[in-house]
Amino acid sequence: MSLQQSLLKWFHKNARPLPWRKHYRPYDVWVSEIMLQQTQMETALPYFRRWMKAFPNVGSLAESDEKKVLKLWEGLGYYSRARNLHESAKRIVRQYNGVFPESYETILSLKGIGRYSAGAIASIAFNQEKPIVDGNVLRVLSRVYAIKKPIDVEKNKQIFWKLEEALIPEGQARYFNQAIMELGALVCHTENPLCQSCPISEFCAAFKQNNAENYPVRKNRKKMVKVQASAVVLSRSGKYLIQKRPLGKIMGGLWEFPEWKLVQNRKLPMDVLKKKTLSLAQNEFGTVLRDFRRLDAIKRNYTHHNETLHVFSAALPNSENGFKTNRAWPHVWVSKKEFQKYPFSSAHAKIAKLIN
């Protein structure tokens, strides 16, 4: 038990004062865990505080409309997380009178909840002795026990789940699970781990072998795909065209300016990129555009893709009374002031700010 005791002692002294740690309300823990999926802590914290002001409990979230939910999530990415929170809140109100369920199996059945999130919520909110294994836990355990099995091979992950579960001290699941994640976040870094400051270095095989950075072991490292894309800010009589992405697609339910993926893993010259974008836009809208010019370029990353989104502006001819688009998505013409009513992805929110 010495490893666990050392880690718990360190955690109680060094734990970050995170807002959901004040009272460990199940609702707060749930929202924080969903936000922290695919998102860094420093990015998620301001979103969490805004969310709690707008939706202080399950009932207020369930009663809200989806547009407001997505608008509050704007910029966090992976928007299915917000929709899953919204749908699950409605279910909790409908089936459990607005009381967040304590049963691990019920938590696991909520939309967007997998084994890790269910274990995190059950252990942190309800102190149940359920294991959790995220990137931080994988890194810590692989170093402490010098585990040479690649962590990106699915069958090997069970080794870590069983090990973490066996380590949980009786009655201390809430603090131990947070402690091991906190250690990974603050001390046991991927690069340049702070081994001299680690409270459990005396138990760490990788530290004793002086090769902590060799762990965790991976079999495959996915290559990043470089993407060139373009978007057009199309104006008409002081208003701008935005389209709603269909549910089921990436960032479904969000609004955006018309955009196109152009090429992967090669770079187009600017004159070719501009000509190609103009051709695509005019073909989609069935009309010649005027005042076509480049505004800026925006970088964005998503699931092994590095994308450069080139932004252009254009106007419909004064004589263009009708309007059509080949894309069967809902679309509206809105003023710049009205942008605040519509949830955009972070890249398209940046585009909106480019408009003078």
Image: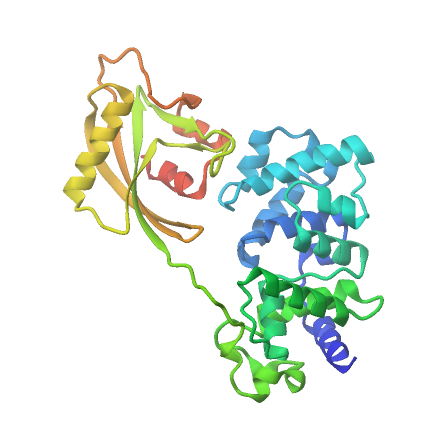
Q: Quadrant of the N terminus?
A: bottom right
Q: Quadrant of the C terminus?
A: top left
User: Dividing the picture into quarters, in which one does residue 240 lie?
Assistant: top left
Q: In percent of the image, x 72 and y 58: which residue is there?
A: 21
Residue 43 visible here: yes
User: Dividing the picture into quarters, in which one does residue 323 lie?
Assistant: top left
Q: In percent of the image, x 19 and y 28: which residue is there?
A: 291
Q: In percent of the image, x 30 and y 25: which residue is there?
A: 235
Residue closest to the far left: 271
Up/down of 194 relative to 340, above or below:
below
Give the side of residue 248 with respect to residue 165, left or right: left
Residue closest to the far right: 171
Pick whichever, 263 or 341, lies toward us: 263
Instruction: Please state the horizontal and vertical placement of residue 266, each as a whole percent of the image.
Output: 24, 51
Instruction: Please state the horizontal and vertical placement of residue 271, each as a whole percent of the image.
Output: 15, 41
Q: In percent of the image, x 72 and y 56: which residue is there?
A: 119
Instruction: Please state the horizontal and vertical placement of residue 342, each as a whole percent of the image.
Output: 49, 30
**So how many labels did they put on this image?**
0
Up/down of 190 relative to 251, above or below:
below
User: Dividing the picture into quarters, in which one does residue 230 lie?
Assistant: top left
Q: How is the image coloured?
A: rainbow
Residue 59 visible here: no
Pick whichever, 341 or 140, lies toward us: 140
Give the side of residue 351 with respect to residue 58, left or right: left
Pick whichever, 117 or 350, lies toward us: 117
Up/down of 207 relative to 161, above or below:
below
